[in-house]
Image (cartoon, grey):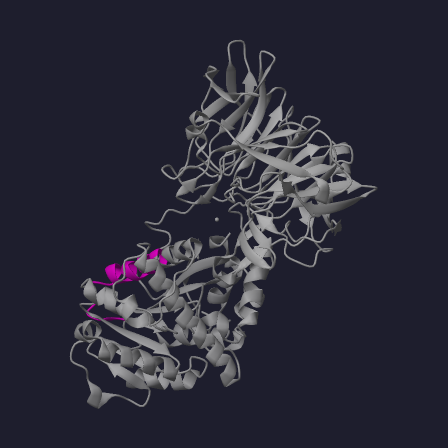
Amino acid sequence: MCGPAAPPRWARVSLGRGGEAPESVRSASAVSLSRQVQGTGGSSAISKCSAAERGYIEDRFLPLLAGRRRRRAPLVHRGYYIRARAVDHCVQDFLLKTQSYPRTQILSLGAGFDSLYFRLKDMGLLHHTVMYEVDFPNVACQKAALIKTAKELSALVGDTEGERLGVTTTFSGEDYKLLGVDLSELSKLSTALKEAGLDNEVPTLFIAEVVLTYMENSRSDALIQWAAEHFSQACFLLYEQMHPEDPFGRVMQQHFSQLNSALHSLSQYPDCEAQQRRFFEKEWHLKCSHYFVLTASKGMEPSWTPLLSSMTVPHHHGPVRMVGSISALVCEVHSETSGLRRYGHHSALIKPNVILTTGGFGEENGQHCRMRNFHVLIKHAGYWKAGCVKKENPDKRWDERLYHTVSCLSSTLALVVGGRTSPYAALGMLWLKFPKTCNDLDPNDITVELVSLQPAAEPFALRWRHSTTEVIFKGEKYLFMYGGRSAAQPVLGDWYFLHTPEISCTVIPVEGPVPEGRHSHSACSWKGGVLIAGGLGAAEQPLGSVFFLREAEHGFQWQTVETHPPLIPRYSHTAHVHDGKLLLVGGVWLHSFTVPGITVIDLITGLCLDYTINVEHLEWPLMLHNHSSVFLPNEKELLLIGGGGNCFSFGTHLNPKPVSLSLRNILTSH
């Protein structure tokens, strides 16, 4: 029995994770919206140019096309590096696999001010390939004018064929065609490409870098299906956003909505699996987990699978089995200060119901800055008050450090270790001295004196994202400083024992398997030793190992803590120990489908249980990385302070208020 013929579809689809934004395309209806979308293409060119100027990518043609110059943040540079590497890999793989064909084509949809043609031509990779670029008419005209006025660009294109320009062709060379067409007008697009010489019967690579998402889904789906139906040998390279509903994704969506450039694809195609189904039916650490690279092919022998051949795909755990949920509640704080909106800070319980928060990057007096002031939270009569700590010696420099540690040695003395002001400026140690008597009911009545240590004690402390934890050896107290990173080393695996209270460096023998170097891990005191969990390793891969440094007869010994199921690798989390259980709070992991909540590890049996955090009572995305947390054992309550960070090019997110998590049920049910 014969049924109707199946519509053409993409035969092979493969994905890789990667990840500002777009080169450009039309969203729905109004011209004003298309102008907003076009603006994202210019912003993308500026970001790429900034990354190239600082050595993240090699591209001497971008400055000739980008126009304005503006320095972007390092995270944006790294995102564009990943994007460039992924796209360049796939394009060059296509050219390599089709070099035996007499002719091939590349069609870049929403190309904006991209320099891909000029880079490929300069490398001698377009011997038998013609490249077509399509964008809005005014964008194509602007780019054509830039090419004509830049001798380095026009020389690569060669003799132009101006007399044969069609209605929509703004620039034409022997192997380069630039067309001004709205991608959402499919019939006009098809006609314009045919007039420009596009051949449906030769191998063709379609490229769409953050383009289709700005179109209505019905129009972008039609474009994908058109490519599958009209080209006998086609490959499709798609780079877009995904995972719209977690905290980072919500900030990302809000950013594009404010630009009047909504991401239409995200609602219908929120993840890799949905994008794969999209192509099959019609026919790619926080930021990278919200972009993907998809490649699809049809009629190619052998199949075009650039993401499955030479690229290394990191191992991902299966679905996370959440055994329960913990409700997050806003912790209402009586305060006239916004100083708790920050990340990269440290919070410490300096005495019962008194929490000191220092450093980090956040908001002071309505401005984003490195935090100069110390803040304190005091609990009284069931509610919290916040205030700004007064410095007894205001002329003493704090240096507004980030990613430091604070260890309380008594109710009147705390030690600050490490931190940085920039990736090239690490800081040493500092005493914080509090008066023996103060009004613990008024947060604005607490004072602190800053006292420097002797310079000889400084060199080994010049690090950040490390841990400093109290241990006991032969009845004496020490601070165990471990890991982190420095201006010279991206990952440190060394450690030091600092005898208290004089903070002298003491050599104590350590045996057992040495943990891999790491930073952004957690460390907790337990049974006189220290528990180290997670972190980011030398290869910038999250770690899932847990180690216990315990006191032995002649020193200390490293022991591996086996967990079952295995702990999902993570970093930038916090941790606490209570009644033989290790609590890991938040962090970042590479798992696509959820964000870390609370993980409870039984230190006797090794049982590892994951709980999600229910945020339905919060009015903002809760980002649990670069945060601090304080465990209140009597109440079995976790207080989460600050957290957030730079959300790629979408802005900085700061959790606006402290959040309370009651752990009474999960700590009494095991």
Toward the viewer: 370 or 210?
370
Position of residue 535 relative to residue 132, above or below, is above
Toward the viewer: 412 or 418?
412
Magenta highlight: main SS = helix
Q: Is residue 101 magenta?
A: yes
**Residue 394: x %, y % from top left:** 57, 42
Residue at x 68% of width, y 31% of height: 435
Q: Is residue 88 left or right of residue 405?
A: left
Q: Is residue 562 left or right of residue 388?
A: left
Position of residue 152 relative to residue 89, above or below, is below
Residue at x 58% of width, y 11% of height: 474
Q: Is residue 211 magenta?
A: no
**Residue 88: x %, y % from top left:** 31, 59
Q: Which quadrant of the structure image shows residue 523?
A: top right
Residue at x 51% of width, y 13% of height: 555
Toward the viewer: 376 or 100?
376
Position of residue 546 relative to residue 1, above or below, is above
Q: Which quadrant of the structure image shows residue 106?
A: bottom left
**Residue 650: x %, y % from top left:** 51, 62
The magenta segment is: 85-105
Tell me if I can see residue 263 in this picture: no
Position of residue 185 relative to residue 69, above or below, is below
Quadrant containing the C terminus in the rendered view: top right
